[in-house]
């Protein structure tokens, strides 16, 4: 997911953290959601149903927990598969749906929900920027529960079956999954279209995506998995200049990391509040994405990287969201560099470091911030850490390990965990295995400490004294220095900085033209800035 400028500026103040509404339920495991929906872009409100398949992870399970935001004009009821009413009640966390009989550990549980009316959130009826009605879901981070009773937690993944009915034949339906097909229905009061789809891989509920509106389809060639994109008719010419690199990018990602996990790839213009949203195989794009000078390529690369890191390998806890956004924020520019349509990675990292350095959250909060009040905090008030600092952590790890080990480790991590939701320790283990090094110090320092080293430099003819001036304990890091000797020879060397003050001596001086961190491989501040 790529943030808009507006969201980057959001500051949410959190008092006492309360994560109880944003947890998983280990006593149950969602296996499948089979949704049937009637959606009309021109008429707000929906009618639909869902057949649930869960497995009990404990003995004597008496109810299933589901997350749902209540709305006065939205009616939800539950029945068994034979139509018997199931009672449900709300508590401080969500809904508890009582089962007809207690389930044993490992037992499969099936029941259904029926819903109708105007839901609280997560699905929106809007006008496109050209005045055309569109209805679309926008679940991130915890808004699937705004209309769809579900286990709304990133660590819980399930398969989805979708049947979406919409009036008439003018509207196009974009929805998660593969095998989408169009069928006409004349047995209803108004002729309608039915779209059917199934997901190839299990996904989290925030990744489920549905959009209905008047779209034109834009074909992008080069890979059979590329399905025609959903774009506004008036943006078709501009969209052609942006939607032309995915085949090349997919080949680069597969060669470097491993196979693409989804049966299709396409994008959809919607009035999303995000710059882009990485729904697996069905990426949401903000309406104005093709207006810029780069035709949206930087956002499109970011979202494609998410298909590998963030989607195929997801994160199981909100505090590990950096495993998604940090990877996309780093490998997006890397992908642009590899495809020779973006600047060198050092240039991209200069911009990332500059943006992060000016942030308050960068000084005060770590990446793995446990004091968040709600998951959106990681993508609003702490987004500079989740995105920018996390990207720089990967860049510093690359410098620490070298390119061969770094990319080998990323590939091993992806191939081992594709299809799973993981935590940071899984990534750390992969990188330690690839490098044969103990990296606990690196991950704890850069993920769990706020800020970064503050450095001052006292240059002399034959040495430099490097001092860490921050009040907190010294950081441990490698620092590259480049200098010119008296005879004109240019030298560069990486130095291990472990103490509050470190003296680096030079021979062949007096030296001149010293350069600090010439390849932009360290997150630091100058002096007491």
Image (cartoon, grey):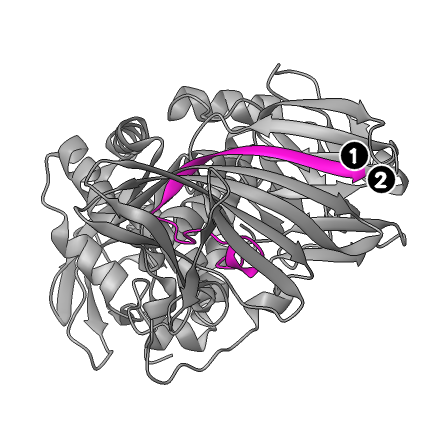
Q: Name the quadrant containing residue 314.
A: top left
How many C-alpha atoms fall within 10 Å of the one at disc 2: few (<14), some, or many (≥20)?
some
Residue 282 place in picture, x, y as percent? 60, 36
Depth check: give the residue in front, 323 or 394.
Answer: 323
Residue at 52% from the left image edge and 65% from the top image edge: 69
Tags 2 and 1 touching, CB below 8 Å? yes
Residue 217 place in picture, x, y as percent? 79, 29
Q: Is residue 149 magenta?
A: yes
Depth check: give the residue in front, 442 or 492.
Answer: 442
Q: Name the quadrant containing residue 497.
A: bottom left
Question: Which residue was labeled with disc 2?
Answer: 214
Quadrant in which the C terminus appears? bottom left
Would you say 11 lies left or right of 229 here? left
Depth check: give the residue in front, 331 or 315.
Answer: 315
The mark found on residue 307 in the picture is none
Q: Which residues are magenta?
A: 140-166
Q: Is residue 191 magenta?
A: no
Residue 447 place in picture, x, y as percent? 26, 60
In the picture shown, does residue 250 fall above or below 472? above
Residue at 47% from the left image edge and 38% from the top image edge: 82
How many C-alpha atoms fall within 10 Å of the one at disc 1: few (<14), some, or many (≥20)?
some
Would you say 460 lies left or right of 141 here? left
Residue 406 place in picture, x, y as percent? 28, 35
Question: Which residue was labeled with disc 1?
Answer: 172
Residue at 85% from the left image edge and 52% from the top image edge: 42
Q: Earlier in the sequence, mark 2 or mark 1?
A: 1
Q: Circle 2 sits in a helix, a strand or a loop, which is it?
A: loop
């Amino acid at each position: 997911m790529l943030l808009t400028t507006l969201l980057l500026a959001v500051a949410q103040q959190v008092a006492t953290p309360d994560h109880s509404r944003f947890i998983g339920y280990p006593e149950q495991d969602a296996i499948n959601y089979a949704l049937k929906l009637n959606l009309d872009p021109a008429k707000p409100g929906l009618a639909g149903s869902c057949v649930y398949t869960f497995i009990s992870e404990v003995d004597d399970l008496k109810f299933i927990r589901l997350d749902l935001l209540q709305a006065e004009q939205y009616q939800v009821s539950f029945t068994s598969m034979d139509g018997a009413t199931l009672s449900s009640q709300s508590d401080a966390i969500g809904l508890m749906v009582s089962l007809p009989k207690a389930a044993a550990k490992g037992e499969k549980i099936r029941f259904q929900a029926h819903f109708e009316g105007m839901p609280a959130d997560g699905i929106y009826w809007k006008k496109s920027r050209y005045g055309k009605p569109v209805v679309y879901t926008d679940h991130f981070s915890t808004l699937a529960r705004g209309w769809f009773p579900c286990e709304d937690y990133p660590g819980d993944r399930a398969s989805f079956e979708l049947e979406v009915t919409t009036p008439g034949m003018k509207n196009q339906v974009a929805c998660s999954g593969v095998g989408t097909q169009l069928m006409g229905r004349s047995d209803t009061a108004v002729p309608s279209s039915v779209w059917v789809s199934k997901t190839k891989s299990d996904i989290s509920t925030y990744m489920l995506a549905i959009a209905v509106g008047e779209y034109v389809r834009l074909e992008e060639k080069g890979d059979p998995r590329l399905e025609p994109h959903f774009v506004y008719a008036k943006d078709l010419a501009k969209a052609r200049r942006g939607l032309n690199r995915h085949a090349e990018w997919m080949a680069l990602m597969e060669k470097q990391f491993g196979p693409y996990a989804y049966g299709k790839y396409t994008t959809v213009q919607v009035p999303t509040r995000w710059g882009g949203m990485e729904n697996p195989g069905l990426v949401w794009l903000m309406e104005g994405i093709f207006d810029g000078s780069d035709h949206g390529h930087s956002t499109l690369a970011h979202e494609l990287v998410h298909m590998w890191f963030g989607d195929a390998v997801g994160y199981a806890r909100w505090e590990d969201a950096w495993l998604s956004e940090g990877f996309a924020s780093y490998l997006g520019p890397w992908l642009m560099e590899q495809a020779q349509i973006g600047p060198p990675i050092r240039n991209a990292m200069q911009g990332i470091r500059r943006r992060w350095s000016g942030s308050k959250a960068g000084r005060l909060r770590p990446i793995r911030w446990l004091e968040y009040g709600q998951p959106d905090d990681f993508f609003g008030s702490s987004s500079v850490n989740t995105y920018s600092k996390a990207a720089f952590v990967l860049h510093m790890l690359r410098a620490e390990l070298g390119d061969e080990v770094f990319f080998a480790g990323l590939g091993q991590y992806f191939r081992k965990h594709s299809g799973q939701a993981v935590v940071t320790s899984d990534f750390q283990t992969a990188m330690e295995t690839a490098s044969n090094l103990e990296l606990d110090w690196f991950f704890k320092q850069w993920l769990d400490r706020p800020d970064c080293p503050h450095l001052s430099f006292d240059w002399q003819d034959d040495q430099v004294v490097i001092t860490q001036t921050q009040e907190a304990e010294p950081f441990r890091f490698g620092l590259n220095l480049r200098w010119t000797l008296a005879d004109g020879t240019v030298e560069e060397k990486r130095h291990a900085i472990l103490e509050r003050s470190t003296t680096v001596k030079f021979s062949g001086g007096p030296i001149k033209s010293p350069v600090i961190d010439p390849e932009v491989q360290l997150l630091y501040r100058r002096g007491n800035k």
